[in-house]
Image: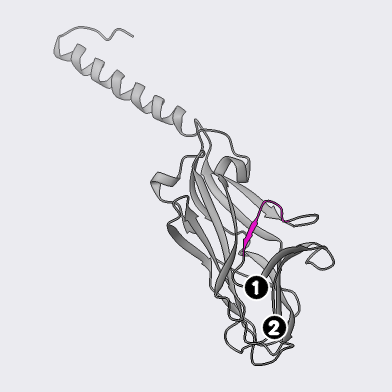
Amino acid sequence: MAEATKTWSFLSDVDGWTGYPAGSATLTWEGSDGSPAAGCLESRILGKNQNPGVMYWEIVDTWEGFFGIASGSAVTQVGTSPLADYNHRCAEYVYGYNGANYLGPFEFFDNVPTLQGAFSAEEVYTGTTSWATKEGAALAVASPLQPSNTTVRFRLSLKLRTGNSDTGAVRIRQDEIKLTITYTPPGAGGDVFFENRHAIEQGMKAATAAGMGGVLIE
């Protein structure tokens, strides 16, 4: 088994992620803020009684494309190490609708897309916050998705809502998204397989030779 880690730091752009807004919300790259360095993803709504519904950031690629592993590898687990999914903060909260502004869940999909599981649940905001780390958990990868050339998706959902004021605004930012996979490189374990097969074949030859009163020929 081996491990590989991918970190998206958003230093100069969205780093391959695509934002899917709802209603009047905007999902963009922000260069003046971030953690641990400037550059992050930003989601914002502005105005009175804004409630556009669930939106999300998503990225799509193969295991090979995401993690740089060799063709023929098999991915058995995807998750976080050391349990640090991403950094986040609420940068603006003016007449936000309490209990209805959140970031997450952070989820793993196949390319259909069919949900495979969530690394972490929602983070709910009731005011502005400093940067913090959202922790998560690893997920097992189903057998059909284990080949390294399989296309998979990672999605970070969110929902923003303002209250009954023309100056209502909510702005959420996330940075330093990190995932680690556990995988078997191509050929790993193969030598053991062939050694075991050779031992079995030799045992069968020896048994046959003994039964015939002969000798074992290599």
The answer to whether mark 2 and mark 1 are in CB contact below 8 A is yes
Q: Which mark is residue 122?
A: none
In the rendered image, residue 11, in percent from the top left (x then y), is placed at: 80, 56
- Provide the residue span drawn in magenta: 14-20
Nearest the camera: 49 or 77?
Answer: 49
The 10 Å Cα crowd at callout 2, few under 14, some 14 to 19, many 20 or more, is some
Residue 181 shows in this picture: yes
Q: Label 2, on which residue?
A: 47
Q: Is residue 48 magenta?
A: no
Q: Where 24 falls versus 48 (above or below)?
A: above
Nearest the camera: 211 or 78?
Answer: 78
Question: Residue at horizontal 65%, vertical 58%?
Answer: 178
In the rendered image, residue 38, in percent from the top left (x then y), is placed at: 83, 63
Q: Amino acid at mark 1?
A: Ser
| Disc 2, SS | loop
Question: Residue at horizontal 62%, vertical 78%?
Answer: 160
Rendered image quadrant of residue 52: bottom right
In the rendered image, residue 57, in percent from the top left (x then y), is placed at: 61, 62
